[in-house]
Amino acid sequence: MTQVITPLDVDQVRISVVLDNTIDLLMSSTDIAKRLPLGPNPFEKSLPIAEHGFSVLVKVKKGNQEGQVLFDTGVSRQGLLHNIDALEINLSDLQAIILSHGHPDHAMGLPGVVDRLGSRNLPLVLHPDAYLERKLVLPNGDEISVPAPKVTDFQRENIEIIEEVGPSMLVDGMILVSGEVARITDYEKGFPIHYAQRQDSWEPDPLIMDDQCAIINVRDEGLVIITGCGHSGIINTIRNAQVITGIHKIYAVVGGFHLTGPLFEPIIPATIAELQAIKPRYVMPGHYTGWSATHRIAHAMPEAFIPNCVGTTLLL
């Protein structure tokens, strides 16, 4: 039986998109989604950029307690640091870094953040499999390298590496990292062309078990779930969060839903049907969700859907 680990209920969570695949400087703000403020002369200052990667700054508040973590670090040192500066983010208040998994579009900006932090001692939470060298083997036999973060990039005195397979609690119990996600649906079967190197040999690695999410419990509203790519499957991810926290009400789901490309587009209808049954109040798919899935979710769940772009801050 799964041990229930319930994060403290917080009064507020702010999720700021530091890096993602898209940017739209003219997107309108709402009460929930605040877009990048441009000011009278926006093109005279440094503007953020989009890259194929993901990173969000998560701030939580409960009474007088506040905390913030960086969830994922994007695909490049230059891109992440550029956006941190363009968005005027101060890393001095950062309390932890979370890697959703070890793929380069989520981990390659990490050395830049570590250098920027200087001498501060900071926890870095990741699954042990995040260090695995990976590759994709396409149907025609072509191979694409998927390099892993190197422990030497951040094994320094100012970083406390926390390698966990199971859940981890951060920021005085206000943010829960899921650890490995249980795979329960019959249609979210992983990435069949994905391989990992273990003990000098390549073997199939379709499930990508280092994939994990961040979970915040907002008072009276339910769970906010933040994913990276969503290799576990977004429904598996949500259901796992409900089981490990004992909370079934879902307030918001943000991040990659991993529904892009010919291997995953066939499961879009089943995924949307289950999302509609779960009834999150808000969904903001990004990064590895894909054009087709994003638009079909927007059509199927218009009141819940929030378009995503770099510079957006959700106020929940």
Image (tube, rainbow, N blue to C red):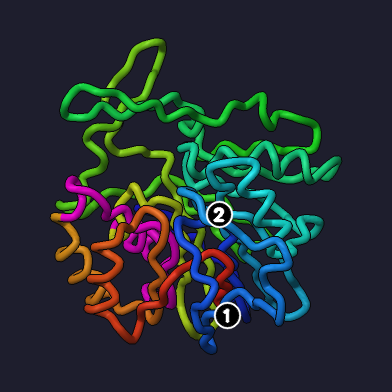
Q: Give the quadrant of residue 120.
A: top right
**Crowding near pointer 1: few (<14 within 10 Å), some, many (20+)?**
some
Tag 2 secondary structure:
strand
Q: Position of residue 71 (x, y in %)?
A: 57, 54
Disc 1 from disc 2: Cα separation: 17 Å
Quick one: 45 or 126, which is closer to the camera? 45
The residue depicted at 51 percent of the width and 58 percent of the height is 214
Q: Give the quadrant of residue 243.
A: bottom left
**Crowding near pointer 2: few (<14 within 10 Å), some, many (20+)?**
many
Quick one: 232 or 144, which is closer to the camera? 144
Q: Position of residue 306 (x, y in %)?
A: 41, 77
Q: Circle 2 sits on which residue?
A: 55
133, above or below 111, in the image: above
172, above or below 200, in the image: below
The residue depicted at 15 percent of the width and 65 percent of the height is 269
- Residue type at mark 1 is Lys
Residue 316 visible? no
Quick one: 2 or 174, which is closer to the camera? 174
| Residue farthest along the right direction in this orientation | 119
Q: Is residue 93 left or right of residue 47?
A: right
Q: Position of residue 190 (x, y in %)?
A: 25, 43
The residue depicted at 53 percent of the width and 68 percent of the height is 216
**Magenta-span inclusion, residue 244:** yes
Quick one: 114 or 165, which is closer to the camera? 114
Q: Is residue 224 left or right of residue 96?
A: left
Residue 132 visible? yes
